Amino acid sequence: MSTQFHEQRLRHNSPVSDDLIRWLDAFLIDRQSFNVTSGTMRFYHDKIKLLVDYAKSREIACVSDFTPTNIREYLIALSANHNPGGVHMAYRCLKTFLNWFGRRQSQPTGQIRSAISRR
């Protein structure tokens, strides 16, 4: 059985912009509104900063620009300066953000899961 590889962008059918920085800011505000601890907020801020730095280096300006490949490349790039636990924490933050974004955009969960799948 042959496996066909393809890039799948996160798509949404909303007229609302999917500007990455705007959505990351909204995500952080959402997390803060749940009255999470200061340590949890620091965790989110630190991991989001890593994601923003990577996105800028790859000219990823919109959430819809994320593909399974560039998410995996992000995790590989992190492994140069982080231990496996640190990479996994960054992955968890990205996964939480993308799931949150998908719920806000009525995103089909299959597209989100495909993009953030570890396999």
Image (tube, helix red, strand yellow):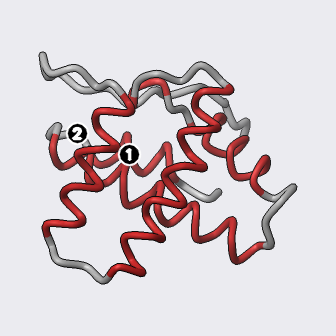
Image coordinates of residue 93 in percent, x first then y, are 46, 62
10 Å neighbourhood of mark 2: few (<14), some, or many (≥20)?
some
- Residue identified by numbered label 1: 112
Specify the quadrant of the image occupied by residue 16: top left
Reply above or below: 75 against 63: below
Please name whichever residue, 105 or 81, is drawn nearer the observer in this view of the structure.
81
Residue at the image position 58 percent from the left and 32 percent from the top: 55
Image coordinates of residue 23 in percent, x first then y, are 29, 38
19 lies left or right of 104? right
Residue 107's label in the rendered image is 2
**Residue type pointed to by label 2:** Gln
78 lies left or right of 69? right
**Residue type pointed to by label 1:** Ile
Reply above or below: 59 against 34: above
Specify the quadrant of the image occupied by residue 19: top left
Please name whichever residue, 41 or 108, is drawn nearer the observer in this view of the structure.
41
Image coordinates of residue 66 in percent, x first then y, are 50, 32
- Give me the C-alpha separation between circle 1 and circle 2: 7 Å
Residue at the image position 66 percent from the left and 24 percent from the top: 58
Residue at the image position 66 percent from the left and 30 percent from the top: 4
Q: Secondary structure at mark 1?
A: helix
Residue at the image position 78 percent from the left and 50 percent from the top: 76
Reply above or below: 47 against 26: below
Q: Secondary structure at mark 2?
A: loop
10 lies left or right of 1? left
* C-beta proximity under 8 Å, tags 1 and 2: yes
Please name whichever residue, 80 or 53, is drawn nearer the observer in this view of the structure.
53
Q: Quadrant of the C terminus?
A: bottom right
10 Å neighbourhood of mark 1: few (<14), some, or many (≥20)?
many
Q: Which badge, 1 or 2, is on the more N-terminal residue?
A: 2
